[in-house]
């Protein structure tokens, strides 16, 4: 999308926004901005997709949380105190039940006249929370249920593809997990991996093997969303606002399959992490989607002819 055009139509001066530290975007401008983004992207779930694609870019904001928190509970508590740096529309609340806990985003009064902003920022927050929590751990903690105030049955399938759980209409945005997850330690080594990926992302987004423009877009999306959990073809198709069948057809037209692209992403990341990080082979295996280190070692030998340890040496 044309950023300058969208900003201009939203009465936002891009030059001043980038150069003046005290430049303010009003709530009315924010409302118009979201409406224009939805219009030009032709995506009614822009906030949802934005939250699912944001985690790497947000590392600079959450890095301090990662480094100063020993458990998921501490990280969530720290994040809640910083929410006002992102938006004044919502307050973050963590509630513990007997067997579960929930992270809720409560609507603050006075912003009801900005419904488009409220919807997409709310969608963004709950999606970003899920994806960033996945990014903190060497596990893929699936939520039990998701509450969305603006939930509409027409988009039920797409919401459930993104969240991989039951989604229903509720008063506030909320995400519910098993309670024992709160005590899960944060693997701080992942911060090194994620920061390394963030710093080198543009170099990695140059796949030599892929010639088609659409397959390169899929490759680059998987690269930026690759750490700590495997991206399903359903989730990727949902992000590109198309069906799985359409995605497969477009790739077939370029003479490639989704699985071949996934393999190329894993190979690229594996070599990059072995060369540039101090993380263990086990950690790297989990980060790029292998449940067993032995499977990763076999794949790495297929790609390079030697084991990860030998390659690093």
Image (cartoon, rainbow, N blue to C red):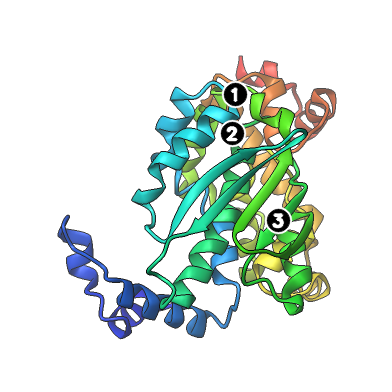
Alpha carbon separation for disc pair 1 and 3: 25 Å
Which numbered mark, 3 or 2, is in the foreground of this view? 3
**Quarter holding the N terminus?**
bottom left
Q: Tag 3: Cα neighbours inside 10 Å, few (<14), some, or many (≥20)?
A: many
Q: From where the camera sits, is residue 310 visible?
A: yes
**Quarter holding the C terminus?**
top right
Query: With 117 as the anchor, is 98 left or right in this view?
Result: right
Q: Which of marks 3 and 2 is nearer the N terminus?
A: 2
The residue at 79%/25% (across/down) is: 297
Residue 206's place in the image compared with 38, above or below, is above
Residue 1's place in the image compared with 102, above or below, is below
The residue at 64%/31% (across/down) is: 137
Q: Earlier in the sequence, mark 2 or mark 1?
A: 2
The residue at 74%/21% (across/down) is: 307
To which quarter of the image does residue 288 belong? Answer: top right
Alpha carbon separation for disc pair 2 and 1: 7 Å
Is there a contact, CB below 8 Å, between mark 2 and mark 1? Answer: yes
Which residue is identified by label 1? 187
Which is more toward the observer, 233 or 131? 131
Alpha carbon separation for disc pair 3 and 2: 20 Å
Q: Earlier in the sequence, mark 1 or mark 3?
A: 3
The residue at 74%/50% (across/down) is: 262
Which residue is identified by label 2? 136
To which quarter of the image does residue 13 belong? Answer: bottom left
Q: Tag 2: Cα neighbours inside 10 Å, few (<14), some, or many (≥20)?
A: many
To which quarter of the image does residue 250 belong? Answer: bottom right
Q: Tag 1: Cα neighbours inside 10 Å, few (<14), some, or many (≥20)?
A: some
Query: With 277 as the anchor, is 308 left or right in this view?
Result: right
Residue 196's place in the image compared with 37, above or below, is above
Which residue is identified by label 3? 146
Where disc 1 sits, the SS reads loop
Is there a contact, CB below 8 Å, between mark 3 and mark 2? Answer: no
């Amino acid at each position: 999308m044309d950023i300058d055009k969208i900003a201009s139509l939203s009465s936002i001066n891009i030059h001043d926004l980038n150069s003046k530290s005290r430049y303010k975007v009003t709530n009315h401008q924010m409302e118009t901005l979201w409406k224009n983004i939805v219009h030009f992207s032709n995506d009614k779930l822009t906030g949802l997709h934005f939250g699912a694609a944001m985690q790497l870019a947000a590392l600079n904001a959450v890095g301090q949380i990662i480094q100063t928190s020993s458990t998921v509970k501490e990280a969530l508590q720290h994040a809640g105190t910083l929410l006002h740096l992102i938006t004044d529309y919502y307050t973050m609340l963590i509630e513990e039940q007997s067997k579960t806990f929930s992270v809720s985003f409560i609507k603050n009064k006075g912003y009801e006249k900005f419904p488009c902003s409220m919807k997409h920022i709310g969608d963004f927050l709950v999606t970003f929370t899920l994806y960033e929590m996945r990014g903190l751990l060497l596990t893929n903690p699936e939520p039990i249920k998701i509450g969305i105030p603006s939930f509409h049955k027409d988009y039920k399938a797409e919401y459930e593809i993104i969240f991989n759980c039951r989604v229903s209409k509720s008063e506030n945005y909320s995400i519910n997990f098993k309670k024992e997850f709160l005590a899960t330690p944060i693997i701080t080594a992942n911060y090194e991996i994620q920061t390394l990926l963030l710093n080198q992302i543009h170099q990695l987004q140059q796949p030599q093997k892929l010639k088609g423009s659409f397959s390169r877009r899929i490759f680059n999306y998987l690269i930026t969303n690759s750490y700590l959990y495997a991206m399903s073809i359903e989730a990727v198709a949902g992000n590109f606002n198309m069906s799985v069948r359409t995605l497969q057809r477009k790739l077939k037209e370029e003479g490639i399959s989704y699985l071949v692209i996934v393999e190329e992403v894993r190979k690229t990341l594996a070599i990059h992490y072995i060369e540039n990080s101090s993380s263990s082979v086990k950690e790297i295996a989990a980060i790029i989607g292998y449940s067993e280190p032995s499977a990763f070692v076999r794949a790495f030998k297929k790609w390079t002819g030697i084991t990860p340890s030998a390659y690093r040496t």
